[in-house]
Image: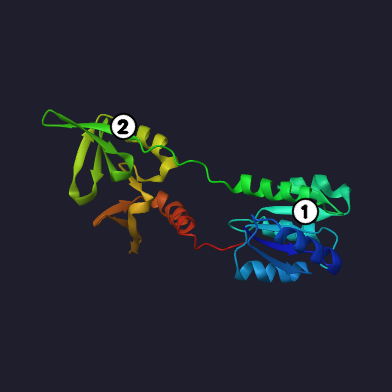
Amino acid sequence: MKVLVVDDERPALDELTFLLERDPRVHEVVATDSATEALRVLQETDVDAVFLDIQMPGLTGLELAQVLSRFRTPPPIVFVTAHDEHAVDAFDLRAVDYVLKPVRQERLAEAVRRVLAGSAKPAEPADEQIPVERGGVTRFVRRSEVRYVEAQGDYARLHLGGGEAYLVRIPISTLEEEWQPHGFWRIHRSLLVALEHVDEIRTELGRCTVLVDGVELPVARRHTRELRDVLVRRSGKGPAG
């Protein structure tokens, strides 16, 4: 872990830094004595957690936490303070832990454990397999192979890479409901696309299209803005806070 420590009192800052550096799970500690400087640090580098005092001159720890909560990916926060009356406010801001001073090594180790437990990535869901038939042969197509889906009445045509396609007796509305959590997005009443395979989004003379696996697909006007927003969020290039 790389952590940021923020405390306006130098002895407390040095002590917390020392204790965190002794933890084998922490490989780097960045220390600062002001919330304003902490914001600058966070704009320039990523950290795995922020250990934050509450009562500081200028921007308080709670105010800094409110600012961080508006980041696209807020860092986990552990409040380290001598005052227990702010605990409710701290947990309202979704703090991972609330450690009282004087800090004990064992208590701090528990806070680090909670940070790591909260940041553990959930297991990836199994890649669904869809049985398709052609010429009397049943093949199992993985959901991740599908570039886009085209509605054909009560059926749907699954388009894979290289122009390969299979017809399945599943309405596109059912696939939309089941596959949206896995990155598929409705762009038209008859089209569902895998966002990870969208190479380009184009707008010309008020008409919006996307390029998927070399195929240009129309985007309905009512879906255009929402599609742009979700693609920007997935790219990670939206505003940080």
How many circles with numbers are drawn on the protein?
Answer: 2
Local packing at callout 1 (Cα closer than 10 Å; few below 14, some 14-19, many 20+) is: many
Residue at (10%, 31%) from the top-left corner?
A: 135
Q: Kindly tell me whether residue 208 is visible in this rendering.
A: no
Q: CA distance from mark 1 to mark 2?
A: 50 Å
Residue bearing the label numbered 2: 171
Quadrant of the drawing holding the C terminus? bottom right
Q: Position of residue 174 (x, y in %)?
A: 37, 32
Residue at (83%, 53%) from the top-left corner?
A: 103
Tell whether 135 sits left or right of 89: left
Q: Earlier in the sequence, mark 1 or mark 2?
A: 1
Tell whether 79 sits left or right of 141: right
Q: Give the structural element (helix, strand or loop) at label 1.
A: strand
| Pick the front one: 30 or 15 | 15
**Label placed on residue 79:** 1
Tell whether 164 sits left or right of 63: left
Q: Position of residue 120 (x, y in %)?
A: 57, 46
Q: Kindly tell me whether residue 64 is visible in this rendering.
A: yes
Answer above or below: position of 167 versus 58: above
Local packing at callout 2 (Cα closer than 10 Å; few below 14, some 14-19, many 20+) is: some
Residue at (52%, 62%) from the top-left corner?
A: 238
Its colouring scheme is rainbow
Identify residue type, mark 1: Phe
**Label placed on residue 233:** none
Q: Give the structural element (helix, strand or loop) at label 2.
A: loop
Quadrant of the drawing holding the N terminus? bottom right
Q: Position of residue 215 (x, y in %)?
A: 24, 55
| Pick the front one: 179 or 171 | 179
Identify residue type, mark 2: Pro
Q: Position of residue 109 (x, y in %)?
A: 72, 49
